């Protein structure tokens, strides 16, 4: 089963762009798909994550926010693979 990660982001956020770029090679390494959702387009996401973006999720599990924690995400993906 393919791994799908969700990146809660916003268009004008430089940290969001940085996390998406840093995540790309890690996602490729594990064959994970990354779905990017705009926090400002969804009131529920905005209520939950407004000040935390970018937020990286796998399902309901928050892997990191603000900055990519590559070692933590790599370890998590290795465990669920």
Image (tube, rainbow, N blue to C red):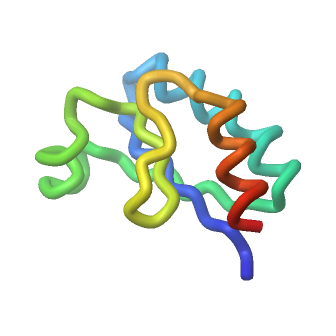
Q: Residue 26, image x and y in percent?
A: 78, 41
Q: Is residue 60 left or right of residue 23?
A: left
Q: Residue at x 12, y 46 (%)?
A: 47
Q: Residue at x 60, y 28 (%)?
A: 69
Q: Residue at x 82, y 61 (%)?
A: 31
Q: Is residue 5 above or below residue 1?
A: above
| Residue lying at the far top of the rendered structure | 14
Location of residue 54 (image quadrant): top left
Q: Residue 25, image x and y in percent?
A: 82, 39
Q: Count up the numbered dots.
A: 0
| Residue lying at the far bottom of the rendered structure | 1
Looking at the figure, which quarter contains the C terminus?
Answer: bottom right
Q: Residue 6, image x and y in percent?
A: 50, 55
Q: Is residue 65 above or below residue 33?
A: above
Q: Residue 34, image x and y in percent?
A: 62, 55
Front residue of 61/40: it is 61
Looking at the figure, which quarter contains the N terminus?
Answer: bottom right
Q: Is residue 66 above or below residue 1?
A: above
Q: Is residue 8 left or right of residue 56?
A: left
Q: Residue at x 38, y 23 (%)?
A: 12
Q: Is residue 64 left or right of residue 74?
A: left
């Amino acid at each position: 089963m393919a791994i799908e990660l969700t990146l809660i982001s916003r268009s004008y956020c430089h940290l969001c762009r940085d996390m998406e770029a840093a995540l790309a090679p890690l996602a490729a390494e594990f064959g994970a798909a990354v779905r990017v959702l705009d926090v400002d387009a969804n009131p529920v996401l905005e209520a939950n994550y407004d000040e935390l973006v970018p937020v990286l999720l796998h399902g309901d599990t928050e892997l990191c926010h603000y900055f990519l924690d590559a070692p933590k995400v790599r370890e998590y993906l290795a465990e669920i693979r």
